[in-house]
Image: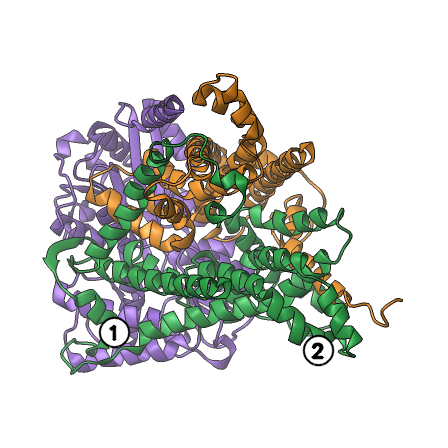
Chain colours: A green, B orange, C purple
Amino acid sequence: MAGAAPGGASRSEIYRGNGPRLMLPIWVFIGIFLVMPVVMMAVHSFLTKEFRGGVIWEFTFAAYDQFFFDRGLFGDEPPKIEWTYIGIFWRSIWQAGLATVFSLLIGFPTAWFIATRKPNVRPGWLFLITIPYWVNLLIRTVSMKFLIRDTGPLNEFLLWSGVISEPLSLVNTNFAVQLGLFYSYLPFMVLPVYAAVERYDFSLSEAAADLYSDNWTTLRLVILPVVKPGIVAGCILVFVPSLGAFLAPDLLGGAKTFMIGSLIEEQFKGAAGNWPFGAAAAMILLAIVLGVLLLHAHAQTRVER
Amino acid sequence: MAAPIDIRRFTGFRALTILCLVVLYAPLVIVAIYSFNDSTSITRWGGLSFKWYFDVFSGPEAPKFRAAAINSFTIALGAATCATTIATAAAVAMHRTGRFRGKTASLALINLPLMVPEIVTAVASLIFFISIGFKTGVMTIFIAHLVFCIPFAYLPISARMQSIPDSYEQAAMDLYATPWEAFRLVLLPLMVPGILSGFLLAFIISLDDFLITNFVKGAGIETLPTAIFGSVKQGVKPNIMAISTLLLGVSVVLVTLSWFVGRAGQSKR
Amino acid sequence: MKTILTSTALALTLASASDAEGKLSIYHWFEYIPQELLDTFAAEYDVEVTMDTFDSNEALLAALKAGKPGEYDVAVSGDYMVQIMADEGMLNTFEPSELANFGNIQDQLVDVSFDPGRKSSIPYQWGSTSFSVNKEVYGGPLESLSLIFEPPAELKGKVNVLDTSGETLTLASLYLDIPQCSSDRDQLKALNTLVQTAKADWASFGSDVAKDVLVSGDAAAGMIWSGFSAKARGEGAPIEYVFPKEGMIVWMDNVVLLKDAPNRENALKFMDFLLEPENAAAVTNYAQYTAGVKGVEAFLDPEVANSPESNPPEGVKGVFVEACAQDVQEMYDAIWTNLKKLA
């Protein structure tokens, strides 16, 4: 990352001794207003729930127990593995994974196409890709909902052009959620892949072509392995935010398809009112995400060595 | 000798790129078009009209959206200003002060808001503010925004600093400038493009946030995204499309500005 | 650098200091009061009014518990929720003499079970919860809750259900003819099975969208409140509000005075204001329910007063949602959570 980059500028010691002082605001703000809250959330996940919101300061594993074990509707059956919450997490991972795959399938060709334009027009192309990301996520999600609703412009266009004879029911489906996630985070895929492709040494492809490899074989055997770090970075940048997304499932999935984000929100804002459980679910999500990032960092350091 | 095949060309990649752009822009363009629809029904086209824009500024919901807009822009301005200041200090520490204890940890800390999922930050902030008895309101939104704006402000500033050699400051200090003078009169002006684009990114990120704001906002306090969310839950109405189009315009202008500032900075060197 | 930080922080603190006089903070259902009426109140009493909205009684309770006390002055709460909030110690009391218009409350609504003698609440509006069906999609008889819980082929996959456990599970109990707040295991299991099976035929859960989905055609049948259905009909939805033979929910919404209300005086002024027949009628004309105030008739829109939704035929059974004991309620919560969490 930035600070570890080699090169004269970063190594400069011109204001030597001022480091800690200049870093102090970072430690104060992120330490107090992000690290501390996460620690308190961890503590809350071990507290007893108060009926309909709030906590009682008594230590218990009840929240995690509820997450992993099913004791029946009345709470007195022998514990079985509770698949529903694991299922929600699994479904979220699956949805986020599919959105990541879609993004890669569209994002890689786009990144490749841009990276092979003339250098002076590339920034323009990249700019076109990034603009939508900076538009309010809520507005983009609402726009997508409007576009694909049963009586929306997409269906009207398809009916008019004769592609379909019945309007497609897209809203309130898993597909709509995937589409929303894909749409939300697509630029995150294009940018890192582009950065990797731009650095790609095309003489490798030339060498492959000289050895009678056709383009698609070269892509598979030469290009993909070389630009893999960019692809992995792109996948992480799409996958991680998709996993905890709230707006896409809520607005496009009809609040019927629970994903991790909506499950957690329901514990605090909705009728469920079970704070320790919401905190526990958030802790588990955090653990998964940090796990993915650590795995990535680990793999990266191994490659660098 | 020309290669028998163009090694850079793959059949279908151009088409997929166009598809990518269509997917990214179609919903926004459609909403922008329909915001000029004269009809009250959002799906039927009833002719060109600006009436929903008038509605935004003078309709029955106008005071609500005006208050939300003022909150949104005040918070974004405050959060972006503070985040940029903090990030600038951090970037100087990172690139100009050599090794010190906790440097690696500091970098991890700067990037932490990017790694923690938004819903987790939202829940943690809510629990934190309630536990310490902080009254939720504009202040809590501001603090939460400030924290997650820091990495967005830091990235462009740090990227910019990486390409500024310290020889200018060395020269200044050889001529008896104090470190503070060297920073203020030499380094800071060189950093301006990075600082500006960092500020603009932080500003947009703050303006954009819904989830965290929705958790830490207090009674009667709305920002534009939470106000819009409240409205669209009951169905997309034409006035929402008009607000969306306006906000879309603001984002596009700011990003374009940030882009040109960044490029101007690059071409100067 | 530091000056910028501190001055910005200071400016924001000042901007958020809201203890000034002349304010009123309302926590209200969405789309339930005309903005003009709030503006009138604000102008008449020189009070700055802010309002947040919620979409279910349960969400109201959760939000008040998650917030700090003293954030809102008044809230609008359903009958059974008034009792729950009182039990939770969330309500403040007032004397009838503090409200000049207390006598305007309809006599039968003064001594209500959830707030005998009206110590913390005044009536707002009352109405019913049932469901509406798009007659262009389904032409059969409109008489049973089976259209929602065991929908015919035409309506399968096109049903919207209110996203609130209280009303949805109560209607389901009416359909199965089991009592509310039952702790009988077989009855609870039957209830659980019914909603789990029905969920496959439901398109979405949504309270705030209940009107919009019927108007836009996204749903062909939907659980809905009487006035909200009337509004949907007014916006062109070809629907009919059904009075099911199994019975429906009747409810009474109330303006409650919250504990630690920062602006108690203004809250009471607002309650008094809402007891003026003209103002109560303005709410009715907007939300299309029925006011609980004497003398509103003169101010009512005839179309609203005579709407089929507000005038059920003779002999329709109406029940109030009951507030269950905590251990029983937790079982109903479990059924609801189970329902919502499964795909």
Question: Where does the image place residue A43, in percent across and percent down from the top left?
Answer: 19, 55
Q: Which mark is residue A217?
A: 2
Q: Is residue A164 above or below residue B165?
A: below
**Number of residues whose C-alpha sits closer than 10 Å to that of mark 1, classed few (under 14), some (14–19) or many (20 or more):** some
C78 left or right of B172? Answer: left
Residue on which the image places disc 1: A68
Q: Using the rendered image of the protein, determine whether residue C325 is visible from the camera's viewpoint.
A: no
Q: Nearer the viewer, residue B6 or A288?
A: B6
Question: Where does the image place residue A54, in percent across and percent down from the top left?
Answer: 19, 53
Toward which corner of the image does residue B248 lie, by quadrant? top right
The outermost residue toward the right is B1
The outermost residue toward the left is A58
Q: Chain of mark 1?
A: A
Secondary structure under tag 2 reads helix
Q: Using the rendered image of the protein, determine whether residue C234 is visible from the camera's viewpoint.
A: yes
Q: Is residue A282 above or below residue B173?
A: below
Q: Residue at x 39, y 34 (%)?
A: C37
Question: Where does the image place residue B269, in percent across and percent down from the top left?
Answer: 67, 33
Question: Where does the image place residue C160, in percent across and percent down from the top left?
Answer: 43, 66
